[in-house]
Image (cartoon, grey):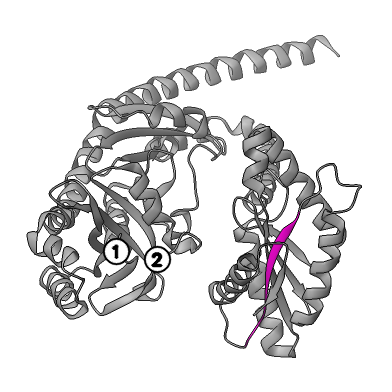
């Protein structure tokens, strides 16, 4: 290289370096000032405003539920024989008066679920929709908020306020409360997002999203598992009196976050602000000054895209797989069911499900510990996968329950169940396992809950015969 070229190169480097340095210094001074203002003032203030709105909106149903739990009419009614007409009128009046989506009472004596239109059902420990009831009763808490689908309202997403009802001696009579439509809460957060240009949502003490303007995240997304925020999730989920501020990196963006704990709900209110959106003007000026960095920016974007795609594939795989056994989870089974029911309706193809429950599995845990029980579950899942056909799907349905979805009629399912039974009881198994199973074939119009409930009834009959049996619905 000639001296002239070297000199021009050196001057170019010095000028560019000086210009880039001064531009970056100005940008970072601006950025620091904006971030300080967001974290110490703007985000906490937004959180307080939204906190007040949510608190005001939710305290009414909480107070009504509290009044129901302490209402002597409800206590006396539960002790006098549970007249259906009386409770229906009582719950209907509350639901109508306050405009709630539903009002309910679940009796601990008869297991009947009463609501404003009468008796909805009898709750049972095997019904996935009834997990909330047994979980709440075990906590011995006075009340709790739960987000769940509302069976009385065609599966509509609902915020339930559950209150314990006890007699004068402290004996549990049941659980009462009201349900508020999730639409009202999501609309409130959507309005806040439009007004403040910030992402607002609520999570429970485990980090599970309970309320969000994006309904696809509700009851499905854990902040403890989301890329970026999971690094600070443990600190976010610490209950505290005052608001706390955090920041994390996600998809190449820095997210500023303020969180407040709502003790009445046992939920955390999270307000997020993309720092980049708050620095649009400063970033635009910097971009115009740093044209020379365009190539590097493109490279970073490509790397970020590759990284995001990589983690997205991992998250998708995790979202459809049971972490212990490697079998499919409920979400994956529901997707397969939708495909199979579509094919059944369009092409007349038949399919069946086998609900399999291990016999005396509790004894394995009691005698050998839960680690051994986990090993047995993994062996069972692996053996079943090796036995069923490639087109069949195995999902873990509960603690020691597995569900097999297969093409074919119930008679084909019975044959497959026997092959699985032979495989699980063969000498090649380190711990041979016996099981009972219920079989149900798909009927036109069945939903997955209906189909599995019929299989569960068949399983119950198989268990009633002493275990180790197969029963078809």
Instruction: Determine if residue 200 is in view.
Output: no
Residue 239 quadrant: top left
Where in the figure is residue 152, as x and y percent of width and height? 34, 74
Magenta stretch: helix, strand or loop mostly: strand
Report the residue marked by disc 1: 106
Asked if residue 441 lies in the magenta stretch, the reply is yes
Extreme residue in the right direction: 428
Q: Name the residue rendered at 59%, 68% in the picture.
A: 460
Left or right of 318 on screen, residue 196: left
Report the residue marked by disc 2: 123
Residue 111 quadrant: bottom left
Q: Earlier in the sequence, mark 2 or mark 1?
A: 1
Q: Which residues are magenta?
A: 434-443
User: In this rendering, is residue 18 above or below 184?
Assistant: above
Q: Name the residue rendered at 55%, 72% in the picture.
A: 453
Extreme residue in the front direction: 466
Where in the figure is residue 172, as x and y percent of width and height? 25, 52
Name the quarter where the N terminus is drawn. top right
> Which element is circle 2 on?
loop
User: In this rendering, is residue 185 above or below 10?
Assistant: below
Instruction: Determine if residue 142 is in view.
Output: yes
Asked if residue 72 lies in the magenta stretch, the reply is no
């Amino acid at each position: 290289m000639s001296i002239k070229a070297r000199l021009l190169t050196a001057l170019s480097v010095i000028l560019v370096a000086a210009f880039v340095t001064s531009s970056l210094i100005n940008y970072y001074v601006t950025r620091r000032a904006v971030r300080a203002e967001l974290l110490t003032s703007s985000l906490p203030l937004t959180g307080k405003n939204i906190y007040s709105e949510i608190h005001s909106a939710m305290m009414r149903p909480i107070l009504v539920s509290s009044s129901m739990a302490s209402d002597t009419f409800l206590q006396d009614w539960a002790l006098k024989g549970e007249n259906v007409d009386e409770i229906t009128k009582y719950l209907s009046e509350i639901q109508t008066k306050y405009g709630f989506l539903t009002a309910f009472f679940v009796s601990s004596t008869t297991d009947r679920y009463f609501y404003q239109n009468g008796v909805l059902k009898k709750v049972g420990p095997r019904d996935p929709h009834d997990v909330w009831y047994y979980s709440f009763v075990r906590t011995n808490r006075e009340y709790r908020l739960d987000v769940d689908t509302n069976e009385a309202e065609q599966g509509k997403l609902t915020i339930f306020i559950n209150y314990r009802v006890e007699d004068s001696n402290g004996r549990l009579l049941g659980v009462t409360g009201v349900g508020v439509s999730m639409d009202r809460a999501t609309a409130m957060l959507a309005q806040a997002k439009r007004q403040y240009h910030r992402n607002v949502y609520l999570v429970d003490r485990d980090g599970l999203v309970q309320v969000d303007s994006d309904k696809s995240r509700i009851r499905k997304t854990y902040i403890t598992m989301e890329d970026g925020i999971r690094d600070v999730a443990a600190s976010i989920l610490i209950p505290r009196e005052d608001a706390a501020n955090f920041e994390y990196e996600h998809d190449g963006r820095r997210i500023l976050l303020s969180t407040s704990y709502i003790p009445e709900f046992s939920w955390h209110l999270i307000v997020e602000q993309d720092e980049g959106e708050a620095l649009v003007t400063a970033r635009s000026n910097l971009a115009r000054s740093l044209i020379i960095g365009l190539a590097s920016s493109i490279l970073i974007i490509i790397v970020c895209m590759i990284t995001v795609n990589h983690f997205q594939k991992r998250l998708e795989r995790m979202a459809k797989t049971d972490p212990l056994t490697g079998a499919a989870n409920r979400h994956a089974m529901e997707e397969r069911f939708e495909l199979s029911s579509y094919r059944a309706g369009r092409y007349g193809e038949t399919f069946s499900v086998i609900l399999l429950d291990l016999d005396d599995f509790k004894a394995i845990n009691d005698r050998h510990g839960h680690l051994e029980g986990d090993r047995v579950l993994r062996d069972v899942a692996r053996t079943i996968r090796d036995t069923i056909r490639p087109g069949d799907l195995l999902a873990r349905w509960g603690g020691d329950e597995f569900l097999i979805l297969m093409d074919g009629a119930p008679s084909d399912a019975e044959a497959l169940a026997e092959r699985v039974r032979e495989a699980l009881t063969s000498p090649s198994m380190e711990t041979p396992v016996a099981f009972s199973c219920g079989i149900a074939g798909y009927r036109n119009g069945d939903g997955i809950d209906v189909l599995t409930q019929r299989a569960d009834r068949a399983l119950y009959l198989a268990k009633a015969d002493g275990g180790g049996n197969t029963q078809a619905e």
